[in-house]
Amino acid sequence: MSSSAILSCEKVTVAFDGFKAVQGMDLKLEKGELRFLIGPNGAGKTTMLDVICGKVKPVSGKVAFESRSGTIDITRRKEHKIAELGIGRKFQAPSIFAGLTVGENLEIAMSQNRSVWATLRASMSKTESERIEAELELIGLQDHRALRAGLLSHGQKQWLEIGMMLLQEPEILLLDEPVAGMTDKETDKTGELLQQIVQKRTVVVVEHDMEFVRNFASKVTVMHEGKLLKEGSMDDVQKDDRVAEVYLGK
Ligand code: ADP
């Protein structure tokens, strides 16, 4: 791996009852990238996220994570171990505690990073409270700390969940269709949020909303039938005849 690589999937193949959902897929991420993974339904995009976070194990191939303490082969690691190493996964439906306030949701996310002893001491340290305040500002919910999370808009719920993930300090965030169901304004705000996040972390987004991808992607990976079809800038990808044929419908 090159020195700035953070994740490298090599020749990953995933089979479900003999059906190859992903076949010999390579995916390399550089530190600080905002990478979009696109392709028609059934192309194997979500399965690739599942492989990276350890939810699904490949039948062959390798996944290596360049952590702060060196290269780690995570191909056979358990999902929770991979999360602990610094790879966070967000699924489509937000998994927030609707009956708790926005601030409480963030406190819980943060406590998952603390020792049991620190959690038992109950009160948050000043730095932790400031950290939550900073996260609230980043996700645009600074005025809603005391609001019940269930009362947030759909977009705000998604941002809250992203904020909860960030408090666990992942190096890589894997997001599955984060703007699905959002208004245009919420979609743009999400793009801006992701651009801020990649100043410190690496983000992979599986996305169907092509306008969103066009507006925010620097590099795009196109999958088709479990394989890598094309990789490059959105311009390069859009010019590719095979991509147009299988995906963009031109
Ligand atoms: P995408 O995210 O690109 O739409 P997926 O990764 O969800 O594609 O799925 C790729 C293929 O694998 C699809 O044909 C899908 O039906 C199949 N698949 C995904 N998950 C499973 C599973 N758990 N069991 C059986 N088949 C699956």
Image (spheres, grey):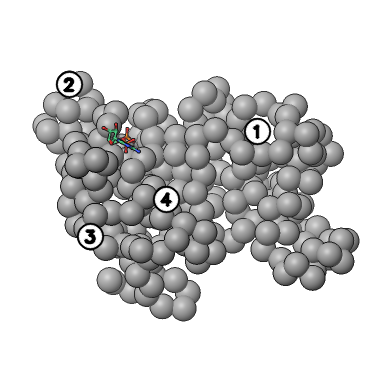
Q: Which residue position is annotated with label 4?
A: 55
| Earlier residue among tags 2 and 1 | 1
Mark linked to residue 250: 2
The residue depicted at 41 percent of the width and 55 percent of the height is 54
| Earlier residue among tags 4 and 1 | 4
Spatial separation of the CA atoms under disc 4 and disc 3: 15 Å
Q: Residues within 10 Å of mark 3 (few under 14, many from 20)?
A: some
Asked if the residue under mark 3 is in contact with the one under mark 1, i.e. CB atoms within 8 Å, the reply is no
Q: Which residue position is annotated with label 3?
A: 61
Q: Residue furthest bottom?
A: 69
In which quadrant of this rendering is ligand 1 seen?
top left
Is residue 239 something one can see in this rendering?
A: no
Quadrant of image for the N terminus: bottom left
Residue type indicated by callout 4: Lys
Task: Please tell me whether residue 131 is drawn above or below residue 156 in the rendered image.
Answer: below
| Earlier residue among tags 4 and 3 | 4
Q: Quadrant of residue 53?
A: bottom left
Spatial separation of the CA atoms under disc 1 and disc 3: 38 Å
| Earlier residue among tags 2 and 3 | 3
Mark linked to residue 156: 1
Front residue of this view, candidates 36 and 64: 64
Tell me if 88 is positioned left or right of 21 in this view.
right
Q: Residues within 10 Å of mark 1 (few under 14, many from 20)?
A: many
